[in-house]
Amino acid sequence: MSSRTPARGTTPTPTATAAPPRRARHGLAIAAAVIALVSVAALLAVLLTTMVGARPWAGLVGIAMIGMPLAFLAAVGLVIDAIRGRRSTAGRRGRP
């Protein structure tokens, strides 16, 4: 490990710890989209099965009922995280 400090007026190079939050947000966004698509597909399957007159599988009903709220909560979390990130970035730049 080097004990040298960067010269005055230079910015230190970003470390590997700066990358994971972006990857985590990207992964959460993909997961939310996949969960939402699977939930919509399950809901359509339940509706079509009921239209035919058959009784839908309970697993499809559960996926449709639980998946959409989970995807919505993940999307809300991403929006809140983006707002917090923009506010902290704006604060560092001197903007209100």
Image (cartoon, rainbow, N blue to C red):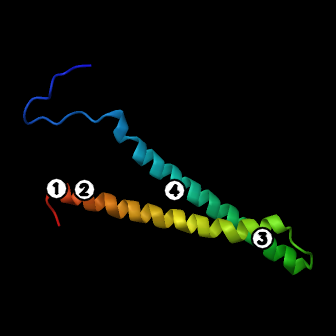
Which mark is first along the chain, 2 or 4?
4
Front residue of this view, candidates 26 and 81: 81
Q: What residue is pinned by disc 2?
A: 89
Q: What residue is pinned by disc 1?
A: 93
Give the amino acid type for the residue marked by disc 3 in the picture. Val
CA separation, marks 3 and 2? Answer: 43 Å
CA separation, marks 4 and 3? Answer: 24 Å
SS label for mark 3: helix
Q: What residue is pinned by disc 4?
A: 29
Q: Position of residue 71 (x, y in %)?
A: 58, 64
CA separation, marks 1 and 4? Answer: 27 Å
Mark 4 vs mark 3: give the one in front. 3
Give the amino acid type for the residue marked by disc 2 in the picture. Thr
SS label for mark 1: helix
Front residue of this view, candidates 74 and 29: 74
CA separation, marks 1 and 2? Answer: 6 Å
Q: Is residue 61 left or right of residue 89?
A: right
| Whether label 4 touches label 3, CB < 8 Å | no
Q: Position of residue 22 (x, y in %)?
A: 41, 47
Q: Residues within 10 Å of mark 4 (few under 14, many from 20)?
A: some
Give the amino acid type for the residue marked by disc 1 in the picture. Arg
Q: What residue is pinned by disc 3?
A: 61
Instruction: Inspect this view and state whether residue 40 appears.
Output: no
Which mark is first along the chain, 4 or 1?
4
Residue 88, quarter of the rendered image: bottom left
